Amino acid sequence: MTVKNLFEYTPGKFFVLVNNSEFLNFVDRATKQVDSSLENPTGSKIYLGMKPIPGFDSEKLPIVLVRDKVSVMAVNLVNKQILKVIGDCPSKVDILRNF
């Protein structure tokens, strides 16, 4: 596994994409461990990139866009939720919310 992207969204807290993993990971620098993970609802294990939305603020607007091989997702880094998926997503996913 290789780290594709990482983003420090607040001091010592990182959002990390790892290729060949269907999980989106939150890493704590102090413990040097994965704090929590979100399962990619598309099942894709190939990430193409990640970018904070314009106006990103770790408290007021903590949203990043994640692009994988089949979709684009909006992820709230504070609530640790996938807010919206645009693209190919299995119908079994119930975690999608209007954004």
Image (spheres, grey):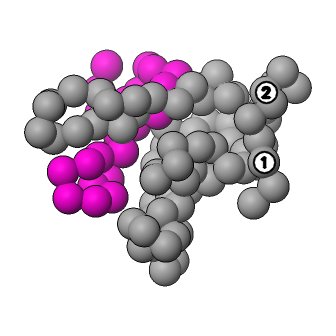
Residue at the far right in the pictured view = 91
Q: Which of 47 and 91 is in front in this view?
A: 91
Q: Position of residue 66 (x, y in %)?
A: 54, 49
Can I make out residue 74 in this image? yes
Disc 1 element = loop
Q: Which residue range is magenta in the image?
A: 1-24
- Measured along the vertical axis of the image, is residue 98 above or below residue 27? below
Say what amino acid the circle numbered 2 marks: Val
Point 14% across, 31% down: residue = 31
Whether residue 46 is visible here, answered yes or no, is no
| Residue 30 screen position, x and y as percent | 12, 39
Give coordinates of residue 41: x percent, y percent: 68, 29
Verify whether residue 26 appears in magenta: no
Which numbered marker is on residue 56? none
**Residue sitting at the far bottom:** 55
In the image shown, does 61 or 6 lie closer to the viewer? 61
Q: In which quarter of the image is the N terminus?
A: top left
Marking on residue 97: 1
Quadrant (top left, top right, bottom left, bottom right) of the C terminus: bottom right
User: Is 61 rendered above or below residue 37?
Assistant: below
Magenta span: predominant SS is strand
Pointers 1 and 2 in contact (C-beta within 8 Å):
no
Identify which residue is drawn at 72% across, 49% down: 84
Q: Read off the residue under disc 2.
A: 93
Residue at 33%, 58% (x, y): give it.
9
Q: Where residue 93 sits: x, y (%)? A: 79, 27
Indicate the secondary structure of the residue bearing disc 2. Answer: loop
Judged left or right of residue 88, residue 73 is left
Q: Is residue 18 rendered magenta in the image?
A: yes
Please give the name of the residue rendered at 49% of the width and 80% of the height, measured from the top-left corner. Answer: 55
- Disc 1 marks a residue whose amino acid type is Arg
